[in-house]
């Protein structure tokens, strides 16, 4: 929170023994204009440390950013990847000078110093290459050298899955289905999908995570991404390959129990159901505003990665940066909880 940002700033200033210019807060509640402070962080030598609550998570280009520290868990995988991208960019020395003019006077080495140091390091590294070592390396190279014939090229006579690979894929898919059926009454997520299909919309993240952990522990060869690849050899798959074992597992369960006639990525299922749900709502008297639609899309993206939205999730990224549960209540009023329930049920259907 903003209060935590103040505490962190105080600790940083004390630990480094620096003044106020060294570490500043970049939040919507800053005493200084946050955009002005962010511009200083991008272009000037000070501040060296910026403490923010979500403002530099996405859509912010600060190439000289050296280090990014997360102070709390991030509930959305997509949001985490976006935040991580802020701190993993690279910048050449000359480019650093362009975006941070004051870096020229920040005790950075000159081009001449870099060249002298580079030559010294090259000489030091070359000193170990004696005649005996060079001969040894050359003999090793000759021993492992491979000759590639680029003149007499082979001709491809057949392209496709061989019979054995298809048989193995069929056996893996059958084994996976048999495992789910054998444990349909023992594991909560499977019990809902098999015995109470009308309640499959209440399957939670923890239920699916429990099932995944059990599979990876007891039957690692049935890892969901591996089974997904087997399906791709046997049938036309709807949607792109999943990025995680969790979303792959949900899609595979739906295929095995007959919810989907063909294997369909969970993302594709959620996107389709979200579109149908919104169209159904707006076909009547209800018309969502642009800000309401922005919130609904955020919820949809959260469901893609976490399977459902709980009210407590609104206190975390990316919702907290937009006002959290209070702002959503302002937008949807007393219908807020009903909207959340409808989305959870409609997107998982």
Image: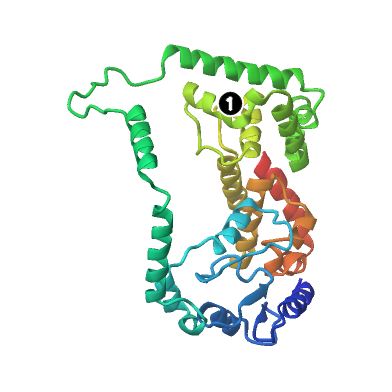
Q: Nearer the viewer, residue 30 or 258?
A: 30
Residue 39 position by quadrant: bottom right
Residue under the image location 60 percent in, 61 percent down: 83
Q: How many marks?
A: 1
Q: Nearer the viewer, residue 267 or 80?
A: 80
Furthest-left residue in this view:
151
> Is there any visible trace of residue 258 in the rendered image?
no
Q: Is residue 129 above or below residue 52?
A: above
Residue under the image location 61 percent in, 16 percent down: 174
Q: Nearer the viewer, residue 164 or 313?
A: 164
Q: Position of residue 205 (x, y in %)?
A: 74, 42
Residue under the image location 61 percent in, 81 percent down: 47
Image quadrant holding the N terminus, namely bottom right
Category of crowding for the residue at label 1, using alpha-carbon neighbours closer than 10 angstroms: few (below 14), some (14–19), many (at least 20): many
Residue 79 position by quadrant: bottom right
Q: Position of residue 238 (x, y in %)?
A: 50, 34
Residue 208 position by quadrant: top right
Q: Is residue 14 above or below residue 302?
A: below
Q: Position of residue 33 (x, y in %)?
A: 62, 86
Residue holding disc 1:
227
Residue under the image location 30 percent in, 18 percent down: 158
Q: Position of residue 21 (x, y in %)?
A: 65, 86
> Is there any visible trace of residue 145 in the rendered image?
yes
Q: Nearer the viewer, residue 214 or 302?
A: 214
Left or right for 74, reference 312: left
Image quadrant holding the C terminus, namely top right
């Amino acid at each position: 929170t903003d209060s935590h940002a103040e505490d962190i700033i105080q600790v940083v200033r004390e630990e480094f023994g620096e003044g106020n210019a060294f570490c500043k807060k970049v939040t919507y509640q800053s005493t200084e204009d946050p955009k002005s402070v962010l511009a200083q962080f991008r272009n000037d030598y000070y501040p060296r440390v910026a403490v923010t609550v979500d403002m530099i998570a996405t859509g912010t280009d600060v190439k000289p950013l050296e280090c990014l520290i997360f102070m709390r868990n991030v509930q959305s995988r997509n949001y985490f990847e976006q935040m991580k991208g802020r701190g993993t960019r690279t910048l050449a020395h000359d480019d650093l000078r362009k975006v941070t003019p004051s870096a020229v006077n920040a005790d950075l080495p000159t081009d001449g110093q870099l060249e002298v140091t580079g030559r010294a390091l090259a000489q030091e590294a070359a000193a170990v290459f004696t005649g005996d070592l060079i001969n040894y390396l050359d003999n090793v190279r000759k021993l492992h050298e491979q000759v590639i014939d680029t003149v007499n090229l082979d001709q491809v006579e057949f392209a496709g899955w061989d019979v054995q690979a298809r048989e193995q894929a069929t056996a893996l898919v059958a084994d996976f289905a048999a495992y789910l059926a054998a444990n349909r009454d023992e594991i909560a997520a499977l019990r809902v999908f098999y015995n109470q299909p009308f309640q499959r919309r209440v399957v939670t993240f923890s239920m699916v995570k429990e099932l995944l952990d059990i599979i990876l522990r007891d039957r690692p060869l049935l890892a969901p991404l591996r089974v997904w690849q087997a399906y791709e050899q046997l049938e036309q798959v709807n949607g792109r390959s999943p990025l995680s074992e969790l979303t792959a597992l949900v899609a595979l369960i739906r295929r095995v129990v007959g919810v989907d006639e063909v294997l369909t990525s969970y993302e594709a299922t959620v996107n389709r159901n979200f579109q149908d749900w919104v169209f159904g709502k707006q076909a009547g008297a209800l018309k969502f505003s642009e800000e309401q639609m922005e919130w609904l899309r955020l919820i949809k993206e959260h469901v893609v990665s976490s399977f459902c939205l709980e009210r407590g999730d609104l206190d975390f990224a990316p919702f907290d940066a937009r006002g959290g549960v209070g702002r959503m209540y302002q937008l949807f009023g007393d219908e807020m909880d009903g909207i959340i329930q409808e989305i959870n049920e409609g997107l998982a259907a």
